Amino acid sequence: MFPGLLLATLFVAYILIRCKLQPHLGPPLAKEERDQYSWMDKMRLLRAGILPLVIIFSMTGLFLMGVTSLVESSAAGAAAATLAAWFKGRITREVMTATLKKTLAVSCMFMWVILAALAFGAVFDGLGAVRAIEALFLEKWGLEPWQVLVLMQLTYILMGMFLDDTAMLIIVAPLYVPLIIALGFNPIWYGVLYTITCQIAYMTPPFGYNLFLMRAMAPPEISLMDIYRSIIPFVLIMTLGLALVILFPQIALWLPDQFYGHIADPALN
């Protein structure tokens, strides 16, 4: 939660400062447009967000309160989404059939992904690949643990230019996770670093997934090169956020520590 809030704060600060220096980039609505809606109108518009908040709470809220387990929270979220669709009168035979087919397809895909990852990890572990990589980084190249960590993050960004996060996870998890533990780093903290780095990779050319999503949503006059240029400050901001989480691990570990008890500092070495 706190790494996400940190990144959101950095984004908001950048946008506010940039628009203050260059007001034409984010002009405010005209006073006439702002005054055409009363407070009651605005409160009625907010009602559209109640159901999504209920669905989110049924998953994350109940899980954090200890009412449901991780698997149970996903079932609670699915049930809440189904009830919301029924409340809106959008449940039909066609919708349920399409939803079940897509759910089955996604579930089967993830089962095969997990199976392949377990097999991949077992083979690599059996061949001694983890020990070989550890010997290469620490003994042959003489790298410090923090240098190995930075090198790992750079490989994520490089792979993220061409692969999605699931493919990256299958490739590197069997190699990097045992290495991270062997180096004395906290795996929860490293998981947060991995997530942030994947989001940076999603915004880097030539095949950043978020870039193509923005291109699909942008007006026709906005070219892909315009989008490539526009993401530079946001990539830098996310890199700054990543560096802050690396330098101050408790940004990522304080909340898990409150829920699950003492969690060791990632920099054991």
Image (cartoon, helix red, strand yellow):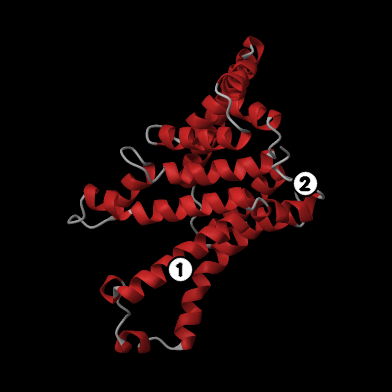
- Work out whether residue 21 can be spotted: yes
Residue 245 position in % (x across, y down):
59, 51
Residue that label 2 marks: 263
Residue 170 position in % (x across, y down):
54, 27
On the picture, is 81 further left or further right than 164? right
On the picture, is 229 further left or further right than 193? left
Badge count: 2
* Disc number for residue 113: none
Task: Name the residue at 56% across, 56% down.
Answer: 4
Q: Residues within 10 Å of mark 1 (few under 14, many from 20)?
A: few
Q: Quadrant of residue 17?
A: bottom left
Task: Name the residue at 75% across, 50% down.
Answer: 68
The amino acid marked with disc number 1 is: Ala
Vertical placement of residue 118 versus 79, above or below: above
- Work out whether residue 105 can be spotted: no
Say which of 222 and 111 sits in front.
Answer: 222
On the picture, is 32 further left or further right than 54? left
Say which of 252 and 143 sits in front.
Answer: 143
Task: Name the residue at 44% across, 35% down.
Answer: 164
Say which of 195 and 58 sits in front.
Answer: 195
Vertical placement of residue 261 versus 126, above or below: below
Vertical placement of residue 105 versus 231, above or below: above
Residue that label 1 marks: 13
The amino acid marked with disc number 2 is: Ile
In the picture, which quadrant includes the N terminus?
A: bottom right
Residue furthest to the top: 127
Q: CA distance from mark 1 to mark 2?
A: 31 Å
